[in-house]
């Protein structure tokens, strides 16, 4: 699941970046090929939905793994405080992921205003720049937190195995 989230968010970031390039290319004649505005809209819709799904699933991943970790610690009587780091992970990821999702949605909606001529294009461009920056910042935090969470779960798994079969674990460590 962790690897799938990382790959999904990476692909979503590529789609949003492609949407930004297509948007700039369709608004200005700076690209060597003609880019139609529909290409920008299609890529933006695809990228925004992917990114929103990716950040949402990452948030649910941390909620679910936090609950599972609490259950395992309570079930096996492990006294080591392994639950506290998961709270720290959430505190680092949730604000960035939430803001990235919010700005991405606002940017997409404002893009519709640009398309109808009610909003100046520079507003959409500024929001898109902020959205890309926030999405990459959120992905950076998510990548770090997911990796740390996986390592924490590996450690918990070893502790659970040690509780369930201490003789087996001691034989493995001596050989």
Image: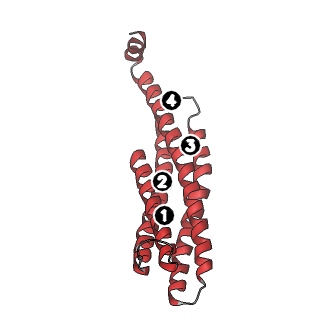
Q: In which quarter of the image is residue 34?
A: bottom left
Q: Residue at x 41, y 51 (%)?
A: 7
Dot label at residue 58 = 2
State the CA–CA distance, disc 3 to disc 1. Answer: 31 Å
Quick check: 96 above or below 151?
below
Q: Is residue 31 visible?
A: yes
- Location of residue 86 in the rendering, given as x and y in whole percent from the top left corner: 56, 43
- Location of residue 126 in the rendering, given as x and y in whole percent from the top left corner: 62, 72
**Depth-wise, is mark 3 or mark 4 nearer the camera?**
3
Q: Which residue is drawn at 41% across and 55% down?
A: 8
In the image, 105: left or right of 174?
A: right
Quick check: 161 above or below 143?
above
Disc 4 crowd rating (10 Å Cα; few below 14, some 14-19, many 20+) is few
Residue that mark 1 sits on: 17
**Depth-wise, is mark 3 or mark 1 nearer the camera?**
1
Q: What element carries label 1?
A: helix
Q: Which residue is drawn at 62% across and 78% down?
A: 123
Q: Is residue 98 visible?
A: no
Nearer to the camera, 153 or 28: 28
Labels 2 & 4 near each other (Cβ < 8 A): no
Nearer to the camera, 47 or 40: 40
Dot label at residue 77 = 4
Q: Quick one: label 3 or label 2, which is nearer the N terminus?
A: 2
State the CA–CA distance, disc 3 to disc 4. Answer: 18 Å
Q: Quick one: label 2 or label 4, which is nearer the N terminus?
A: 2
Q: Is mark 2 on a helix, strand or loop?
A: helix
**Depth-wise, is mark 2 or mark 4 nearer the camera?**
2
Residue that mark 3 sits on: 86
Q: Which residue lies furthest to the top in this view?
A: 174
Q: Quick one: label 3 or label 4, which is nearer the N terminus?
A: 4
């Amino acid at each position: 699941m962790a690897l799938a989230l990382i790959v999904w968010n990476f692909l979503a970031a590529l789609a949003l970046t492609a949407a930004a390039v297509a948007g700039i290319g369709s608004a200005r004649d700076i690209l060597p090929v003609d880019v139609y505005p529909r290409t920008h809209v299609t890529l933006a819709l695809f990228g925004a939905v992917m990114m929103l799904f990716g950040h949402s699933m990452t948030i649910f991943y941390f909620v679910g793994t936090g609950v599972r970790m609490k259950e395992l610690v309570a079930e096996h009587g492990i006294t080591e405080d392994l639950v506290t780091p998961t709270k720290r992970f959430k505190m680092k990821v949730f604000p960035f992921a939430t803001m990235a999702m919010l700005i991405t949605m606002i940017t997409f909606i404002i893009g519709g205003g640009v398309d109808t001529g009610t909003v100046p294009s520079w507003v959409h461009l500024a929001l898109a720049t902020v959205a890309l920056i926030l999405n990459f910042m959120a992905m950076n935090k998510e990548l770090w937190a997911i990796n740390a969470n996986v390592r924490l779960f590996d450690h918990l798994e070893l502790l659970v195995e040690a509780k369930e079969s201490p003789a087996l674990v001691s034989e493995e460590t001596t050989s």
